[in-house]
Image (cartoon, helix red, strand yellow):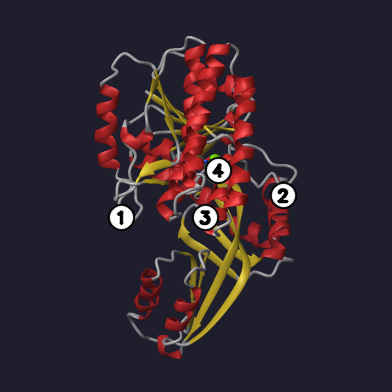
Amino acid sequence: MKIMKFGGTSVGKPERMHQVKDLIAKGDEPKIVVLSALSGTTNALVGIGDALAAGDKATAKSKIDQLQKHYEQFCDELFSSAEAKKEGLKIIQEHFEFLNIILKISFNEAINKDILAQGELLSTKLFYELLSELGIKSVFLPALEFMSIDENNEPELPKIQERLGKLLAENPREKIFVTQGYICKNYRNEVDNLKRGGSDYTASLIGAAISASVVEIWTDIDGMHNNDPRIVDKTRPIAKLSFEEAAELAYFGAKILHPASIWPAQQFNVPVKLLNTMEPDALGTTITADMSEIGGVKALAGKDGITAIKIKSSRMLLAYGFLRRVFEVFEKYKTSIDMITTSEVAISLTIDDITHLEEIKSELAAFGHVEIDHNLSIICIVGNLIMEQNGVLQNIMNSLADIPLRMVSYGGSKHNVSVLVDAAYKNSALKSLNRGLFEF
Ligand code: ASP
Ligand code: MG
């Protein structure tokens, strides 16, 4: 059994949804189809939630009405028969009625999560209806019946496995299952989600839970590129990546894949394929455990919004336990650290979540002098065995000769070199590296 996940743009227009239908109807292998909300919907729902959080019901109402019109139009174009159109409208009415009821009750975070869930509920129900209209047999698999997170917001894979296994066993002969990405239940049994872009994560978790043959992530570009196509002209898709390389790239800025979506597939050794709905026959990118390929730099990615923290302390000299005490501060505030470099008397590290920066800063002050730099970017250079190859680091440094480097991280893994630059230098760093590493 395989997993086929389609992102918002792949289902965002009626004709695109028809393409998805063609793709999933092909082949004999049973599949679980995971859908995102139609493109723009989750943003609109966030807007509705924000308006309600601010007590602005009028704005929320007008956003709801606008979104409803969009869906009514979508439905009209999606279905051919009057009967299916009527069914589609019924689905839309039901969900917008729910949003309108929310307008009348007092708003809280649990309700906000309910609002955010409407996008995936709508897209999957409409798609399921489309399949029935066309006589394609499928089973509707509500994600809220099997996908769950614990009190730390971590997916409960063994439970997911058990519940999903049961649901699938109830339909032993079926070939197509349709479910929602992104949404889940939390430990209070409330509707929750896997954070923005989380449908990829859903697909990978399901893939792991059922030991799928492959997790296919269908988007609107032809795989993971060797550099950011929005910044650099000459980029090309990478045919093969290892899980480690893909995780580094996804985490450090490659937008095509949710960073958390690698580990479940990796743990259960399920290959992940990044494919293009617009060009279904293109090779795309295949991510597997295979590291056997020859080394070399494969790809670059840049991540914005980075803050660097430097702690200088002469007490660090010859001291043990210093790093632990520093890290405990970050642990206390649930803030993860990306890059670290140390000298004998100072430590520099980076974070991207600055929610608790002030508390962190004041606690770190007990260890020494603390300096904070905002507005930085991490440039991540990924490949196989970069470390063991002569000249790679030299090539990287030569390419970056004109760019001031705030931090360099080399040796953390065999697959990655990261440099930290002022955000103003991000684009030129990616372009210079592209020239130096790929265009010779
Ligand atoms: N619809 C959700 C979002 O836009 C989840 C996803 O698309 O992956 O973030
Ligand atoms: Mg996405």
Spatial CA span between label 2 and label 1: 39 Å
> Against 47, is 133 above or below?
above
The crowding category of the residue bearing disc 1, from other C-alpha atoms within 10 Å (few below 14, some 14 to 19, many at least 20), is few
| Residue 340 locus on image (x, y percent) | 48, 69
Residue at left 34%, top 42%?
267
Spatial CA span between label 3 and label 4: 33 Å
Disc 1 and disc 4 in contact, CB within 8 angstroms = no
Q: Amino acid at mark 4?
A: Thr
User: Is the CB of the residue bearing disc 4 within 8 angstroms of ligand 1?
Assistant: yes
Residue under numbered circle 2: 231
* Mark sitting on residue 107: none
> Against 389, is 22 above or below?
above
> Against 174, is 388 above or below?
below
Residue 271 appears left or right of 208: right
Residue under numbered circle 4: 42
Decide if residue 26 is in sight here.
no
